[in-house]
Image (spheres, helix red, strand yellow):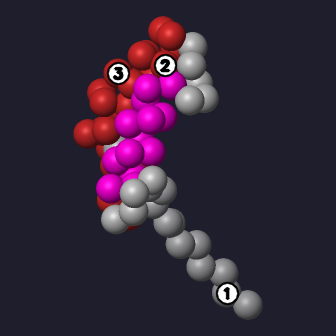
Amino acid sequence: MTTTEVAVPFVDLQRLHSDLREPLERVWRSVLGHGRFVGGPEVARFESAFAHYCGVGY
């Protein structure tokens, strides 16, 4: 029986998401600053944007 090794490259998640790093860190710093992890202004903005994206009112 012959065994063949195949190298499968891993996805470089840092490179893949590098354009999102600064905006995500900015929002994360804001959340850490005020401590409202649930129901804070960032959540409200996300919910509104996601509802708009889905074409629904809320």
Give how far across and how far down residue 8 sits, in percent. 50, 66
Expressed as whole percent of the image width and height from the top left, the position of residue 22 reads 30, 27
Give the magenta part as a residue range.
40-52
Point out residue 54 in the picture as x, y percentages from the top left corner: 38, 64
Q: Which mark is residue 31?
A: 2
Q: Residues within 10 Å of mark 2 (few under 14, many from 20)?
A: some
Q: Identify the secondary structure beneath mark 2.
A: helix
Q: CA distance from mark 1 to mark 2?
A: 55 Å
Residue at numbered disc 3? 26
Q: Position of residue 50 (x, y in %)?
A: 39, 52
In the picture as drawn, the residue positioned furthest to the top comes out as: 33
Inspect the image, locate mark 2, and give the three-letter code of the amino acid beneath it.
Answer: Val
> What residue lies at 48% left-to-right and 34% top-to-bottom?
43
Q: Name the N-terminal-most of marks 1 and 2.
A: 1
Which element carries disc 1, helix, strand or loop? Answer: loop
Establish if 52 lies above or below 13: below
